[in-house]
Amino acid sequence: MGEIIKLTAALVVISMVIGLAVAVTNNKTKDRIKEQQLHIQQSAVEAVFPSGVAISEHEGDGGLPYKYWSASDNGELIGYAFKITGQGYAGDILFMISADTAGKILGMTVLEHNETPGLGSRVTEVASNKYIWYPVGSSEKVKPWFTEQFEGLSCFKPIGIDKSGEWHKFDAQRRAQLQSRNTVTAITGSTITTAAFTKSIERKAAVYVASLKEKYLEK
Amino acid sequence: MITLNTLTDSEKPAITAQTAAAKEVNLPPLHMSSSPHVRSAITVPMIMLFAIIAMVPSLAASVVFFGVNALILTAACVGAAVGTEWIINKALKKEQSIGDLSAVVTGILVAFNLPPSLPVWMAVIGSVFAIGVAKMVFGGLGANFINPALAGRAFLMANYPAEMTNFPATVFGSINALPDGISSATPLEAIKTAFSQGSFQVSEFANALPQLFFGNVGGTIGETSALALLIGGIFLIAGRIIDFRIPLTYIGTVFFLFWIANGTGTYFTLESIITPVFHVLAGGLMLGAFFMATDMATSPITPKGRIIFGIGCGVLTFLIRKYGGYPEGVSYSILLMNLVVPLIDRCTRPTIYGEVRGRG
Amino acid sequence: MLKEEVKRGVITENPILILALGLCPSLAVSTSVTNGLGMGLATMFVLVCSNIIISIIKGWVPDKVRIPCFIMVSAAFVSILHLFIKAYMPLLDQRLGIFIPLITVNCIILGRAEAFASKNSLSRSFTDGIVMGLGFTVSLLILSAIREFLGSNKLFDLMVIPKFQPLTAFALAPGGFFTIAFVMGVVSFLRSRKEARA
């Protein structure tokens, strides 16, 4: 009996001391952690809008997602941003997309995905120009070519998929051609991943922008 | 299984007093060894030479259909394989084994699994992995637990999936059984897409059969020409290098399973065998059945075991081709069955006369 | 004395390559050198702190419940570390993700607590924590360097060889296994050669 008390006492004392230590640390770092998470959220939205715009968050209902953002430049509404989930090759792909009220896509960022490395995961591929030999290379923010090619396309029209090559290797003329046909290039060998984006933009983003347009016009 | 009893110089017992005495009276020296005392004229290099000759028709067909690239790739793979074995033997201070030509055979087989447009340096990497990791790390010839050429191919598939599935057309502009609206690089992709889209028309795929038989189709270097592979396979069986059971049961199982799932709804018509014949001729099945599944170190010893092995490979290939994510399932089926071979050997051990079969 | 201790922790009793402890986080985190460095230093912090505390309380902990007590101590430090990383180094938190809380079950921590800190003085336990953490970090750096270079043609997230298509399998699970196996094999080979000479 005495032994059980001794064992229990040891465990209780240690867990109380530990609990106290962790609780104190938690208290001290709580606010900072919250700040950081807001900051990460904010950067994701800022990435899809041009720089220097004022971004506000809204709660949606009806045909709109739970949370969406609008951006205005000097009081003038530029566009809206949403998080969209698409059905990729190996699970869901979560991405942020922004469009103006006419349905023109302003920017896109991939947030989460589980695609095959070397194939579907190339949606976030950035041609890095920083080498270990001269790490002070150019430090401007380079966008992944896959998401950049969506800029300027209309989400109200079906987005075509071109399999003849990859966008980052095309010259300005071919890129203009693709844009006029509302078409993007697929990642070689990953048509399903590419189609996940085009289909979910057609199905979801178009619907959201359309219902926002109504609201906007109503105002 | 032919027992080899050729002793190298280092294995011959030292000359004892008896043999020295025998030498003095001009008697031949006495060799000492333990049983079995079966002698055979066949050596490992001879077996490998047989295999190389059997692969020459396919090599010729690959050059005919894909140009000199195929030859360059094969040469690079063989060179890399032999070089890797030589370097590893030297580093581990073991006796040089490249003279048994097994590295040459593995090199050719690795090359046969690659698309003709693969960059040469990638092929070299695959070959180095096949010999270095799948063979030498485990102890060299006969000690590997999976087929080295297929291991090399799987390694390359994992690392460079885009380049390994980029199949260019043949020199003659290959026809890949393309019903309108489906474009694909290989016949297997075409038939898989047709089934998944519900647009399978058996007549269109029937037209592709002659092309498949002679080899005017896209695919890896060694798998295109069914005719060349058949010639090589029959040569190997006739020369008693491989056991006919494995290719027979493997191809037979795939044929049977695809006959059951042949997509035309009929069973005893001429139409109903189009799909199974298509699947036997397309892709790497003939290459795998004759040259890969029959690798001596990684297939079962007993005849019953070999039949089980062949059936198992066939079932897996059918499942992967029909229901899996890839259009081609041969290499993974063989690799998976390789892993099960020790178990098969244990279960199919023949009973010795008079022995009571215990548990395991 | 210190030099011998360092040699022990990094070479002769290297936690990953010789003692084969902590292989799970090694496989998962060695995809890039920055990840490996972050993880190694984080583990070293937890190891040192938990070694200190366990060495202090070793007299009072009853033998029958010593394992839960040791685990609680290391879990406490991991929680504190995690909160700090989330607050002040969010990028590292994103990169290492769930592997920071998983330091708790890293065999090195419990292994050294059980085998060393619960039986040795405070100063010796402290030194042991530092050199074992150092050995863990060094071997993680070696593994990560190999995997990051072969698997994504980068080191410290900077490209290395222009126009070299990396072997993606090395940045994934198979590559992790191959790399650890290969490095362990080389180390074991060198050790056996050394012993054969001695």
Image: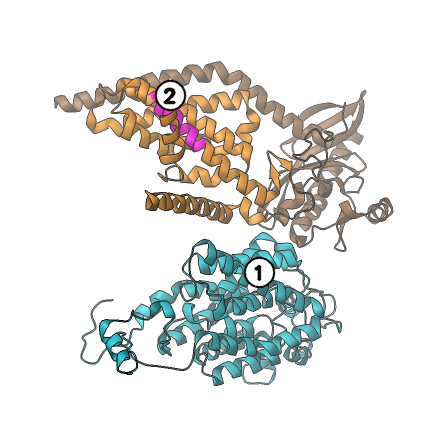
Q: Nearer the viewer, residue A132 or B173?
A: A132
Residue name at image x 60 percent, y 23 percent: A38
* Chain rendered orange: C
Instruction: Please tell me whether the stretch drawn in magenta is mainly helix, strand or loop.
Output: helix
Q: CA distance from mark 2 to mark 1?
A: 51 Å
Residue farthest along the front direction in this orientation: B24
Q: Inspect this view and state whether residue A149 appears.
A: yes
Colour scheme in the image?
by chain
Residue C164 versus residue C170: which sits nearer the camera? C164
State the hue of chain A: brown
Compared across the picture, whether C41 is left or right of A92 comes to left
Mark whose residue sits in front, 2 or 1: 1
Q: Which residue is mark 1?
A: B80
Mark 1 residue type = Ala
Specify few, some or many for label 1: CA neighbours under 10 Å numbering under 14, 14-19, or 20 or more. many
Per the rendered image, the range of residues in magenta is: C126-137
Residue B59, image x and y in percent?
A: 63, 74
Q: Is residue B358 left or right of residue A188?
A: left
Residue at horizontal 68 percent and vertical 65 percent from the top: B185
Three-letter residue code for mark 2? Cys
Q: Quadrant of residue C24?
A: top left
Q: Which residue is mark 2?
A: C49
Assign a secondary structure to mark 2.
helix
Q: Identify by letter the chain in cyan.
A: B
- Which of the two residues, C129 or C87, is positioned nearer the viewer here? C129
Q: Chain of mark 1?
A: B
Q: Quadrant of the N terminus of chain A?
A: top left
Image position, residue A60 (x, y; %) = 66, 31
* Residue C84 among magenta residues: no
